[in-house]
Amino acid sequence: MARWFGSRLAICVASASVVAGCFLGGQTGTADGTASTPSCEPPPRFPANQPVADGVTPAEFARQFEGEHTATLRWSGATPGDAGAPIADAVITVDVVYEGGDGAGCGDLEVGVLVTITTSDGLVHESGPATLIGHAGTLYFATLTFRGAGASVSGALLRSGDGSVDLSGSLQLIAGNVPGDRATFPAPSTAGSGSGGSSGTP
């Protein structure tokens, strides 16, 4: 029995190696115009087209992960509301749109984007603001943070040399503040086989 969760979705895509960085900080400029981050208080902001590290701007970073990204989704429990009924594999789709916002952070870089997140089984359909997080100067890896009310997800976006973006992570539904069914993507049987991921912005 599929249920529509709409605004009841929380996606928190996170990687320990990335989130471990400091997101608060002061910032100064260098002679070539590149921002530097010697301290972590207060939070610095960077204009969309200002180089932050290694010549990479917030806009360049965010545009690397624009587009529609998909992965196979495998639930570990029963269909929500149907005790004992197994859930078939589905597809999770995350559509990322960058609208030119500025960046922020200290060591790591945060840039706001808009996302639409759906699953092919109809359990999730959500749109709203999200945050891409990556190490300043990096264009191939980012985490994505999106929060709602009915689920939590942890994962990552990894951009390959051919322009494709692999999406991976886990999702947990929440009903009445009680953790519910969990899912992983890509599904274990397809992880690393090339079935997950999609083309991003060239």
Image (tube, rainbow, N blue to C red):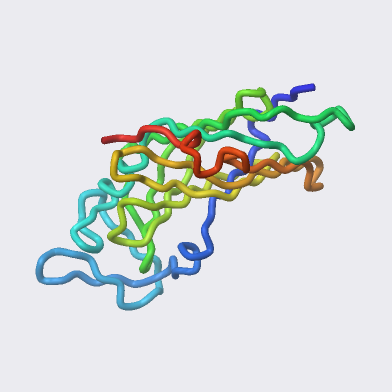
* Residue 115 spot, x, y in % from top left: 47, 35
Residue displayed at 19% across by 69% down: 29
Q: Eyeballing the image, is 100 above or below 85?
A: below
* Residue 20 spot, x, y in % from top left: 49, 68
Give the quadrant of residue 199. Answer: top left
Residue 12 visible? The answer is yes
- In this image, 116 relative to 119: left or right? left
Which quadrant would the N terminus be assigned to in this image? top right
Residue displayed at 67% across by 30% down: 89
Give the quadrant of residue 202. Answer: top left
Q: Which residue lies furthest to the bottom in this view?
A: 38
- In this image, 9 relative to 106: left or right? right
* Residue 21 spot, x, y in % from top left: 45, 69
How many circles with numbers are drawn on the protein? 0
Residue displayed at 34% across by 72% down: 26
Q: Eyeballing the image, is 90 above or below 99?
A: above
